[in-house]
Image (cartoon, rainbow, N blue to C red):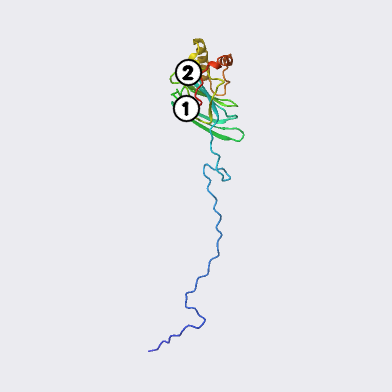
Amino acid sequence: MPVLALVPPSTGESLTAQQPPRSPRRTIPALRPCLSSNSNSQGRPAAARQSATAKWYDRRDSVFIEFCVEDSRDVEVKFDKSKLDFSCVGGVDTVKYHNEVDLFEAIDPNESKHKRTDRSVYCCLKKAESGKSWPRLTKDKAKLNWLSVDFNNWKDWEDDSDEELSSYDRFSEMMNNMGGEDDLPEMDGADDEESADSDDEKMPDLE
């Protein structure tokens, strides 16, 4: 029977397993950040919507609000029984505006109207309970930095005569019937009457 001789490895030979050749390195492309719906094409966050400056005044049958936004577009006004929601894009800088107001009292959404002009957006809120004075616009007695009283049009109608009340009722009616891009109705002598009685008027809350 033949005898197998064990031959030791040569001096320069390694006992470890031979490593396979490395594959060439691949270049991994840089990951691009995902753009959310609140980002623009450059990846910067889109500008947050801000509140539009507004002023308001009270009438016997209606409450009037003017949102002071020039060159507005994409105007949306939603009337709810106890809330007003306003949004638009305005100015050459395409600023996005949004205002949400919890109202002092209930309104009639179906009879409430809004109208856009180049200088502002007017809203006429038809009161659910005619003849009830609103001391403020908002439900909560809180100061809103974007809202102020329109003292040029404010009138203490509770102390007016029947003839004057009828005059302002007609003004409310015309505003309620307005729509689209029609011209605002004019009230002859309204400024004169208000100026004459300005010293006797009751000042509303500044909310």
What percent of the width, then of the height, locates residue 144? Answer: 51, 30
Looking at the picture, tell me which residue is in the foreground, 122 or 140: 140
Q: Which residue sits furthest left?
A: 1
Label 2 belongs to which residue?
Answer: 61
Residue type marked 2: Asp
What percent of the width, then of the height, locates residue 206? Answer: 51, 26
User: Which quarter of the rendered picture does the N terminus lie within?
Assistant: bottom left
Left or right, residue 92 beside residue 158: right
Q: Please determine whether, in this image, residue 172 is positioned above or below residue 101.
A: above
The number of discs equals 2
What percent of the width, then of the height, locates residue 184? Answer: 57, 20
Please tell me the numbered disc located at residue 120. Answer: none
Label 1 belongs to which residue?
Answer: 138
Element assignment for label 2? loop
Examine the image and state in which quarter residue 198 appears: top right
Element assignment for label 1? loop
